[in-house]
């Protein structure tokens, strides 16, 4: 109705907010049978929340009463001539309806009743509230094909297939710092924008601003401490260097020949961690590394150190910007872990299909739009799985006998991996050679060798490492015991015995 009073507008806004709260409660208690329903429901809740916030802002402006209209109206309806004011307003309402006899005022309850009907029986146009690609299958999977093409064309990165990329696209700390060029930053920005947009489409109720503030706060703390993944602060400078090497405890090695058994790559990693030159043959690397045993780095020959490129303020800021984008990617990848795992399973399932199955799938895509077009085929039909068995390549639970045969009912926890849980003995044994366990051992300062197989507790690993170091010390060559001397009568004795005889004058 035209020319509504301030108090009437205020009342309508309060009513609108109360009805919105009721609609949000009904939406949250609504049963969601598949991923599509869950995503659509969260988007409807977000729209209602935005509408409620807009109403609250308008109410705030009314209560602040900057123009004085509310105070003036309250004085008019509560003054000594309240009846005169009442009849004046009543006459205004009648005149309005006389001028517009066919106008119908629709109550607010009608609008929310329509929302209830659309919620219980949504029409076709309201079943696609968000735009997803065919590969994303309305929020079930990630579509990183374009970003994968950008990644494999970057210089200095390891070439891999799409399935492996889905599992390693967030391991940015493994890329050498000198390979993180402007092209890498463009790729990183596109990756962060895609993950942010995908998170907003799949989980619209996530507060992106608070999330970025949390990421920025954690990043500032770790950057200031110099322990951000993939970067560390150089001693005595503000430049950042890539931690491309892992330090090696030399107390367990008594000669360069023992170091040579570790191989070229491990010696290079240890030399890089110390900032030394890492080139040369296996023997040269072992000798160069063994020379540092028991000697502070500042006392070593400067010619042993690799030449470092100093970074100016501009370069430092550039690397800081790249690292901050990496921090965002780490956070988004963590929040989208469920969709990421589902994407890998989907790709593996597709790779396992035969040519006939792929042709049949393409035909079904043309007729019923496969998974995206008809939600009732895949999403609404939930397989019967009371024992919560893993799903096979066909999307159905694997047989229970196979589940028991592979020992998937057994769970193993590894404290070194951050209390990660592994299902089945096969996965448990395999994880000892994976990057997570190797990284945990490296953080403890222990080499990930065969001695530590099946060791999952940190205390046990530390105790075994101390025992191995003690055994190495016992096996070391001791001059007092093993060095031999010949006395004047031709007898061969140890150095200690020889010195005792000489001091006593018996030689």
Image (spheres, rainbow, N blue to C red):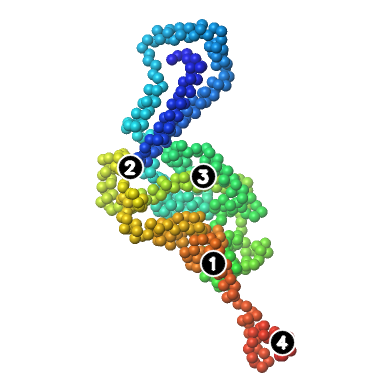
* Mark 1 vs 4: CB contact within 8 A: no
Which mark is first along the chain, 1 or 2? 2
Residue 249 in view: yes
Residue 27 percent coordinates (x, y): 40, 33
Residue density around tag 1, few if under 14, some if 14–19, many if 20 or more, within 10 Å? some
Vertical relation: 134 (above or below) 436 = above
Numbered badge on residue 379 = 2
Give the alpha-carbon distance from disc 4 to disc 3, as whole Å.
73 Å
Q: Which residue is mark 4?
A: 502
Q: Position of residue 21 (x, y in %)?
A: 45, 29
- Disc assigned to residue 464: 1
| Disc nearest the viewer among 4 and 2 | 2
The quadrant of the rendering that contains the N terminus is top left
Q: What residue sits right under mark 3 in the picture?
A: 328
Q: Earlier in the sequence, mark 3 or mark 1?
A: 3
Residue in view at x 66 percent, y 93 percent: 489
Of residues 92 and 441, the one drawn nearer to the viewer in this rendering: 92
Q: Which of marks 4 and 1 precedes in the sequence?
A: 1
């Amino acid at each position: 109705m035209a020319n509504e009073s301030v108090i009437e507008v205020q009342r309508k806004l309060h009513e609108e907010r109360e009805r919105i709260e009721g609609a949000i409660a009904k939406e949250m208690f609504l049963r969601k049978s598949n991923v599509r329903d869950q995503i659509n429901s969260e988007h409807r809740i977000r729209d209602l929340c935005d509408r409620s916030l807009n109403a609250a802002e308008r109410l705030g402006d009314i209560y602040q009463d900057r123009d004085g209209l509310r105070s003036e109206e309250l004085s008019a309806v509560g003054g000594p001539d309240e009846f005169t004011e009442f009849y004046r307003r009543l006459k205004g309402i009648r005149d309005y309806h006389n001028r517009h006899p066919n106008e119908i005022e629709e109550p607010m309850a009608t609008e929310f009743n329509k929302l209830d009907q659309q919620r219980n029986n949504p029409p076709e146009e309201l079943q696609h509230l968000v735009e997803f690609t065919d590969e994303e299958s309305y929020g079930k999977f990630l579509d990183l094909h374009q970003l994968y093409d950008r990644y494999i064309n970057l210089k200095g990165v390891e070439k891999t297939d799409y399935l492996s990329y889905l599992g390693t696209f967030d391991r940015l700390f493994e890329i050498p710092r000198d390979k993180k060029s402007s092209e890498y930053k463009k790729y990183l920005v596109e990756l962060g924008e895609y993950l942010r947009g995908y998170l907003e489409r799949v989980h619209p109720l996530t507060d992106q601003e608070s999330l970025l503030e949390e990421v920025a706060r954690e990043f500032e703390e770790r950057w200031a401490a110099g322990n951000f993944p993939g970067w560390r602060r150089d001693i005595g400078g503000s430049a950042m260097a890539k931690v491309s090497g892992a330090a090696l405890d030399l107390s367990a090695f008594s000669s360069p020949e023992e170091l040579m058994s570790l191989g070229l790559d491990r010696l290079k990693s240890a030399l890089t961690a110390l900032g030394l030159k890492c080139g040369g043959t296996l023997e040269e690397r072992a000798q160069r590394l063994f020379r540092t045993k028991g000697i502070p780095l500042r006392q070593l020959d400067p010619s042993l150190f690799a030449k470092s490129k100093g970074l100016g303020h501009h370069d430092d800021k550039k690397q800081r910007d790249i690292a901050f984008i990496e921090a965002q990617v780490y956070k988004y990848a963590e929040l989208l872990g469920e969709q990421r795992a589902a994407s890998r399973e989907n790709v593996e399932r597709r790779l396992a299909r035969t040519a006939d199955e792929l042709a049949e799938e393409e035909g079904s895509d043309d007729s019923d739009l496969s998974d995206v077009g008809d939600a009732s085929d895949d999403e609404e039909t939930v397989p019967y799985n009371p024992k919560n068995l893993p799903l096979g390549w066909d999307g159905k639970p694997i047989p229970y006998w196979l589940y028991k045969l592979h020992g998937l009912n057994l769970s193993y926890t590894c404290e070194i991996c951050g209390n990660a849980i592994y299902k089945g003995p096969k996965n448990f044994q395999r994880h000892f050679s994976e990057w997570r366990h190797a990284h945990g051992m490296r953080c403890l300062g222990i080499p990930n060798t065969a001695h530590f197989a099946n060791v999952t507790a940190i205390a046990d690993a530390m105790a075994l490492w101390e025992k191995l170091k003690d055994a190495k010390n016992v096996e070391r060559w001791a001059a007092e015991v093993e060095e031999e001397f010949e006395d004047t009568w031709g007898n061969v004795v140890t150095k200690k015995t020889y010195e005792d005889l000489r001091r006593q004058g018996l030689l």
